[in-house]
Image: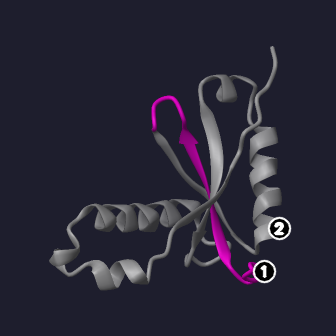
């Protein structure tokens, strides 16, 4: 198993009903700290947000821990846009420097 204590993770907000992205809300160093942060965001959202479909997930990234969430969102979107282009366009090398792996998705459902 790979040591994830030095790896960066983006906590990303999304709507599972509409597929709308809420962007990166935090970039955290280490799997355990990232999982705690994911849980904190999940439990701190208002009751209507989960009913509306809002969830969080962790994504392994090379973004700098603690960076501004708005800047992280912009960089993440550039990476996603590059992934949608053909590798023959010369972006395959750039993609290798921008890893993205979904690690964990919040799954909490509130009753009521």
Left or right, 104 with reference to 94: right
Q: In the picture provided, is 41 more to the left or to the right than 52?
A: right
- State the quadrant of the N terminus: bottom right
Residue 87: x %, y % from top left: 23, 74
Q: Which residues are magenta?
A: 1-19
Query: Which image quarter: residue 51?
Result: top right
Residue drawn at the location 77% of the way across and 36% of the way down: 108
Instruction: Tell me the tag on residue 5.
Output: 1
Query: What is the CA distance from the residue labelled 1 to the residue labelled 2?
Result: 7 Å
Q: Residue beneath label 2, please?
A: 32
Q: Residues within 10 Å of mark 1 (few under 14, many from 20)?
A: few
Name the quadrant containing residue 29: bottom right
Applied colour scheme: one colour
Task: Verify CB contact (< 8 Å) between mark 1 and mark 2.
Answer: yes
Disc 1 element: loop
Q: Residue furthest left?
A: 89
Q: Which mark is residue 39?
A: none
Q: Residue at x 58, y 61 (%)?
A: 69
Which numbered disc flags the more N-terminal residue, 1 or 2? 1
């Amino acid at each position: 198993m790979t040591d994830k204590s030095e790896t960066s993770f983006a906590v990303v907000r999304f709507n599972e009903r509409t597929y709308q992205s809420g962007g990166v809300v935090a970039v955290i160093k280490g799997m355990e700290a990232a999982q705690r942060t994911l849980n904190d965001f999940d439990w701190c959202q208002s009751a209507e947000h989960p009913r509306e479909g809002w969830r969080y997930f962790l994504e392994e990234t090379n973004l700098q821990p603690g960076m501004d969430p708005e800047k992280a969102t912009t960089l993440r979107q550039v990476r996603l846009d590059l992934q949608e282009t053909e590798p023959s366009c010369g972006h395959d090398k750039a993609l290798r420097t921008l890893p993205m792996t979904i690690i964990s998705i919040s799954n909490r459902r509130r009753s009521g």
